[in-house]
Amino acid sequence: MGKTFIMLGIESSCDETAAAIVRDDGTVMASQIASQMDIHASHGGVVPEIAARAHLDSIDIVIAGALRDAGIGMDDIDGVAATGGPGLIGGVVVGTVTAKAIASARNLPYFAVNHLEGHALSARLVDKVAFPYLLLLVSGGHTQLLAVHGPGAYERYGTTMDDAAGEAFDKSAKIMGLGYPGGPAVEMLAAQGDARAIALPRPLKGSPHCHFSFSGLKTAVATRHAALDPDDPAGPANLAASLQAAIADCLAERSSRAMARFAETHGPSTLVIAGGVAANRVIFARLSDAAATAGFSISVPPAWLCTDNAAMIAWAALERRQQPDNLDFAPRPRWPLDPDAPPPPGRGVRA
Ligand code: KG4
Ligand code: ZN
């Protein structure tokens, strides 16, 4: 074994400016996150131009904070990693330029990390899950099922044909006047509601592929919300619970199909859930049942590692620390994990 490798990770692809220090044995020495949630909340979503400026304001502060929390100096860092895409390009540029500047000034290896790979490998940081495993990535921008064979080796089974699951939560919450981000607000309200009270569709349920579709659900929520009886105080909670149940059903059914496909070739393995929506307890319970039925174990990174953070970016770079990137890497707004995957039937594909 060589000397310990300490990676500085930077994440700035959406609305969190984050820096983390992670050691090659998986020790997270520091993880700082500056959230822009308050800045974007009044707009009901992330405004790219405002996000890019806010990243610029915070990036030095979170890096200095992470070094301070870890009790080390820049001299102790062995490599610098930053999210190189996919995401809002202004933010990705801020993180990329910062990482390149540190790497070139300090003569350190630089790693351009795919944000989705950060989510995909985060379970290995805490659970040491062995390859290959099946990943359900459920965030505000992505809903994908992927067979993870190793760093850089992904086979996409399914993706969303329209909205992501987190987007369905966020857009429905906006319709219901619950604010942003919608997922936690819907989950909280749903706890007081009856999930069987309002019938909502289960898009693509039973279809032979592993793709997702959520935009019809959002439309149904709009219709049902407009039809709520203003004299029924339970209406909003029932709608929130019914929405959450519909999303949970879709995720569980699509994941079951993917687990069956994965097991045909590799046998049962682990279903890893990553991304912000994985924090939802009802969804986790449904997916746990589906995994148990398929003979899979389940792994969900802790909440702080499920939502956007820089520890997962540092870890993804550590998984391939012998293969740094060139400093001429260009940020990528779109960067699919499996570029050869066939597109889903119907409309366009998200990265
Ligand atoms: O992974 P993430 O932090 O950011 C990216 O999109 O990359 O995911 C954010 C998404 C948002 O859509 C948010 O509403 C959703 O995750 N989310 C939840 C919950 N917490 C966050 N959705 C459902 N239930 C939750 N408890
Ligand atoms: Zn993310």
Image: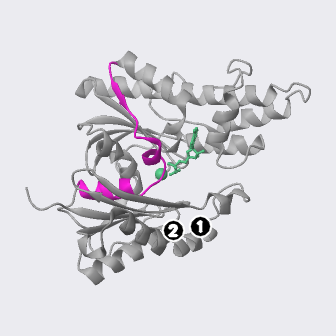
Mark 2–mark 1 Cα distance, whole angstroms, equals: 7 Å
- Magenta region: which residues? 295-319
Q: Residue at x 44, y 44 (%)?
A: 343
The numbered mark at residue 91 is 2
Residue placed at 32% from the left, 59% from the top? Answer: 314
Is residue 254 visible in the rendered image? The answer is yes
In percent of width and height, residue 286 lies at: 50, 23
**Amino acid type at image mark 2:** Gly
Q: Is ligand 1 less than 8 Å from the beta carbon at label 2?
A: no
314 left or right, relative to 180: left
Q: Which mark is residue 51?
A: 1
Give the vertical position of 94 relative to 204 (above or below).
below
Q: Residue furthest bottom?
A: 105
Task: Tell how many labels.
Answer: 2
Kindly check if marks 2 and 1 are in contact, taking CB atoms under 8 A apart as contact: yes
Task: Give the image quarter of residue 8.
Answer: bottom left
Numbered disc 2: secondary structure: helix
Above or below 44: residue 69: below
